[in-house]
Image: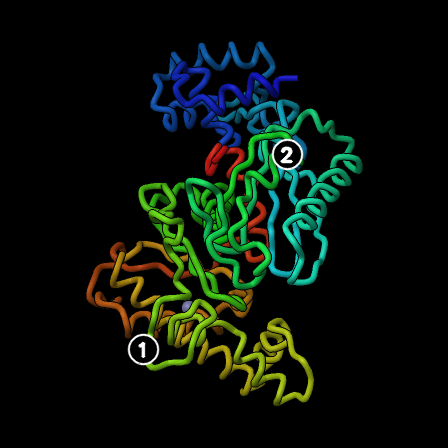
Amino acid sequence: MYGDELNALLADRTVNTPTGRIVRMLSEHGAQSATQIAKLTGLAKSTVSTALSELRKSGMVVEAVAENGREAGVGRPSTRLTLNPEAGTCVGILIGLNHIQVIVADVSHAVLADKTAYVTADYTPAEGVQIARRLVNEAYLEHGLSSESLIGVGIAAAGPVDPRSGRMLRASGIPTWAGIEIPKLFEPVFRRPIFVDNESNCSALAEMMWGDAVGREDFVLFTLDIGVGGAIVSGGRLVRGVAGAGAEFGHIGIDPNGPLCRCGNRGCLELYASFETPLVHASRRFGRSMTVDEVIRLALAGDSGCRRLIEDTADVAGRGLGIIGSTINPPLVLISGVLARAGELMLKPLRASFDRHTLVKRDDVPAESRTEIRISRFLENGPCLGAVGLVLRHQGRLL
Ligand SMILES: [Zn+2]
């Protein structure tokens, strides 16, 4: 019922009225107290108060309900306000290597549905968009949502995306998607604004909006999975690069005489720090096909061979992270990807190797100047949740 008005306010950043600024801030940050709203918008408290009463009267803004079902901070100044959940819904879609995931959330940031369909790696873009459409339809039907409430669709792509056209530059894992202009593919099917970014940037966005980087302006996301990747956030913004290929950490060359990488270069970090080769070793040792989770479980239970595979991978990953450390010296590094599930077992050798290979050592500087390295919040849903975040932040819009 408020969808059009909301979309207009979100889309037109030149609308600099207090109500426009508050609506955009609540869409980006979720529920906030009036004090926080004043701080985050830079508006005077009295201006915020007037604009909020206008927004509450129109029904666009309501009091947030605490997670336990009670009103948040009843009667106290800490009462939190949010966009009316009925004002609109957003969809995030992950175009994965072997699965397509859909998350539906409302504009108050509540996740309403999460659905996944598994596919074979050679699925075509046309098949992908139809599967995504089917999952979205099912989610809206199951949760009694009106498709009219949809304000936009965010797409997390498994490869670098040109920030101007939304074209996938490379898609080594799903080759049929290389060169595809994602907005042009999805817009005719969903008939809503389409927002696109690569999955690592989406993961970083999820950490900024809901995870371990809330309120952090500068950090690096470092993904250790079957591939190696990441994202750089500087001054609260993602560093995409001129062609959309920024923070492709997996393709930092660490050995000019090393084996050929799927990207065409030699000796890329991904060849040594992804868990693909260790899985081959583990499978040979156990005489059957092993998963990363099985190796981690065995390692945590004390199997020395599995521990060694994780420690060696973390060691070489730390070498790559050391290069990133010497380049941008970030205050915070969040580790994501399946290998992060090994927790401290992986973090300890990673931190030690990082310190050995980066310029400024841990003991050289006071505590506040050290790079903090820890596991990210979203090891599973980061990319798809971040795709929802693209819509809420009106970021990555290309059409
Ligand atoms: Zn490479």
The foreground one among 206 and 168 is 168
Q: In front here: 105 or 198? A: 198
Residue drawn 60% across the image and 15% down it = 59
Badge number at residue 256? 1
Residue underneath mark 2: 188
Q: Nearer the viewer, mark 1 or mark 2?
A: 2
Q: Nearer the viewer, residue 269 or 305?
A: 269
Disc 2 Cβ-to-ligand 1 distance below 8 Å? no
Quadrant housing residue 305 = bottom right
Residue sitting at x 48%, y 41%? 209
Q: Amino acid at mark 1?
A: Pro
Side of 268 relative to 364 (left or right): right
Question: Does 71 sit left or right of 22 as displayed?
Answer: right
* Amino acid beneath label 2: Pro
Secondary element type, mark 1: loop
Residue 29 appears in the picture as rendered: no
Relative to 397, residue 258 above or below: below
| Crowd rating for badge 1 (residues with CA inside 10 Å; few <14, some 14–19, many 20+) | few
| Residue 96 locus on image (x, y percent) | 60, 56
Residue 90 position, x and y percent, is: 61, 34
Total numbered circles: 2
Bin the neighbour count of mark 2 within 10 Å (Cα to Cα): few under 14, some 14-19, many 20 and up. Answer: few
Residue drawn where x is 37% and y is 49% of the image: 243
Query: Quarter containing ligand 1?
Result: bottom left
Using the image, determine if residue 149 lies above or below residue 105: above
Spot occupied by residue 61 in the image (x, y as percentages of width and height): 56, 19
Q: Which secondary structure lies at badge 2?
A: helix
Asked if residue 278 shows in the view, the reply is yes
Say whether disc 1 or disc 2 marks the residue closer to the N-terminus: 2
